[in-house]
Image (spheres, grey):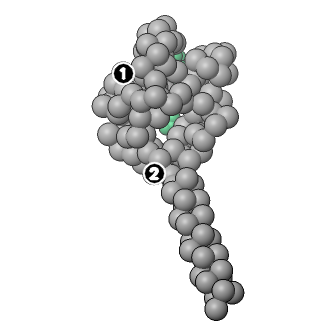
Amino acid sequence: MRIAVRIANGIILLAGIALSATVAAQDKTVNDGVFTAAQVTSGQVVYDSQCKTCHNMRFYRDTLKSWNNQPLLYLWESIMGTMPADNPGSLMFEEYTDVIAYILSENGFPVGESKLDPDNGMDAISIIAP
Ligand code: HEC
């Protein structure tokens, strides 16, 4: 009898752990406040000096649409590897990250408490079409 109770408790405990693990691993989207207001502010400076000459915001909006459901990290990697087109890879990692925060913000996605960080969870944030 005691053993049965213990097993039952064990099962309940394991079920609880499995449930919280599922919640923790669940994907976020760009709609979940995944960048800070400070990143948007710094990103605008980078955007105005490095990204505005060749594309307008409409272009970025279309880009986000075409990247629908892709991990945000892939877009970061793509931009870092190819942009600015006249000098790819010339910005600092942080500048590429901030400029993405600014572009997301301009397309209506909300700021939040957590900082966007390519080394921390950006592969689990999905892009959604604005
Ligand atoms: C000298 C011009 C120039 C500058 C400056 C520039 N780009 Fe680009 N960008 C291009 C060209 C050319 C393409 C590819 C052709 C196209 O899609 O229009 C492109 C493509 C892109 C794409 C589409 C990528 C894809 O795979 O969908 C993104 C996003 C992008 N640029 C972001 C940026 C960002 C962010 C900056 C600033 C850090 C920047 N660009 C600065 C010329 C530029």
Mark 2 and mark 1 in contact? Answer it, CB < 8 Å: no
Q: Position of residue 87 (x, y in %)?
A: 64, 16
Q: Which residue lies at the image location 50% right of the left edge and 31% below the top edge?
A: 114
Amino acid on which the number 1 mark rests in the picture: Asn
- Residue 129's image quarter? top left
Residue 107 in the image, given as x and y percentages of width and height: 33, 30
**Which element type, helix, strand or loop, lies under badge 2?**
loop
Q: Earlier in the sequence, mark 2 or mark 1?
A: 1
Corner quadrant of residue 105? top left
Q: Nearer the viewer, residue 94 or 112?
A: 112
Residue 58 drawn at (x, y percent):
32, 28
Q: Residue at x 60, y 76 (%)?
A: 9
Image quadrant where one finds the N terminus: bottom right
Vertical arrangement, residue 70 with respect to residue 88, above or below: below
| Mark-to-mark CA distance, 2 and 1 | 22 Å
In the orientation shown, which residue stands out farthest toward the bottom? 1
SS of the residue under disc 1: loop
Q: Which numbered marker is on residue 56?
A: 1
Which is more foreground, mark 2 or mark 1?
2
Q: What residue sits right under mark 2 in the picture?
A: 69
On screen, residue 22 versus residue 112, left or right, reads right
